[in-house]
Amino acid sequence: MTQLPVSERSDVFNDNLIYEGTVPLTCQHLDNMPDDDALTQININNEKVLRMVAALDEMHIDTHEEPGHTHDIARLEFKINMLMDLVGQLLERQLQLPSRRHVCVNAYGMQVAMPEQDTIESGQLIKVSLFFTEAYPRPVVLFVSISSSSPHTVSGQVMALSEAVQDLLERLIFRQHRRNVAQQRVSKS
């Protein structure tokens, strides 16, 4: 699996934080962008998926409630998380998610590791279906105008995101960044 070294990262990210990971995804060549009605529906679906990913990603936050209630809420939350994990595993088996690829993405740009047999060239338009979590195996669909291509990676500008999707994607990226910083602090200790 090809990693994307920092030195090879594209400038399509506008100096903003990026989500970086190895996730199931597909790339499909397109001749044209979908029409406005289709884009609206895709953005609505993306918003639903990103909201669900955020809900699954939330950590339990201690509140100033009575200790008995906090314990009950934590137990219920654990049981719900366990059920969601089991359902996600069942869906993953049924859906057969696409192969994993290394990706760097934000609301402005994307860089994807490509298998050698896939040839995508600068100037082409691709549709990327990106699965951020296997616990909720529905993709976020992004349209990317390719600005640079090499034998192992393609980079380009993410297009036609609604404001809500852009905001939710940026929040997901910030949460990943915050976790990475916390992990680095722990590993240095």
Image: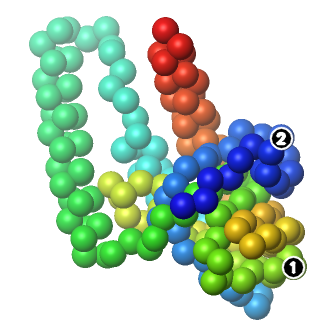
Image quadrant in which you'd find residue 74? top left
| Secondary-structure class at tag 2 | loop
The N terminus lies in which quarter of the figure? Answer: bottom right
Q: Which residue corresponds to the image point at 27% horizontal and 59% vertical from the top-left?
A: 88
Q: Residue at x 51, y 29 (%)?
A: 179
Q: CB under 8 Å between callouts 1 and 2?
A: no
Q: Residues within 10 Å of mark 1 (few under 14, many from 20)?
A: few
5 is higher (above) or lower (below) than 176? below
Say which of 71 and 106 sits in front. Answer: 106
On the image, the x and y values in percent for residue 130 come to 54, 64
**Is 87 situated left or right of 183 in this image?**
left
**144 or 71, nearer to the observer:** 144
Which residue type carries mark 2? Asp
Tell me the residue at 19%/26% (across/down): 73
Q: Residue 177 vs residue 62: left or right? A: right
Callout 2: 10 Å neighbours few (<14), some, many (20+)? Answer: few
Tell which of 77 and 121 is nearer to you.
121
Residue tagged by mark 1? 123
Q: Which residue is mark 2?
A: 15
Secondary structure under the numbered disc 1 in the rendered image: loop
Q: Give coordinates of residue 55: x percent, y percent.
A: 40, 43
Q: Amino acid at mark 1?
A: Gly
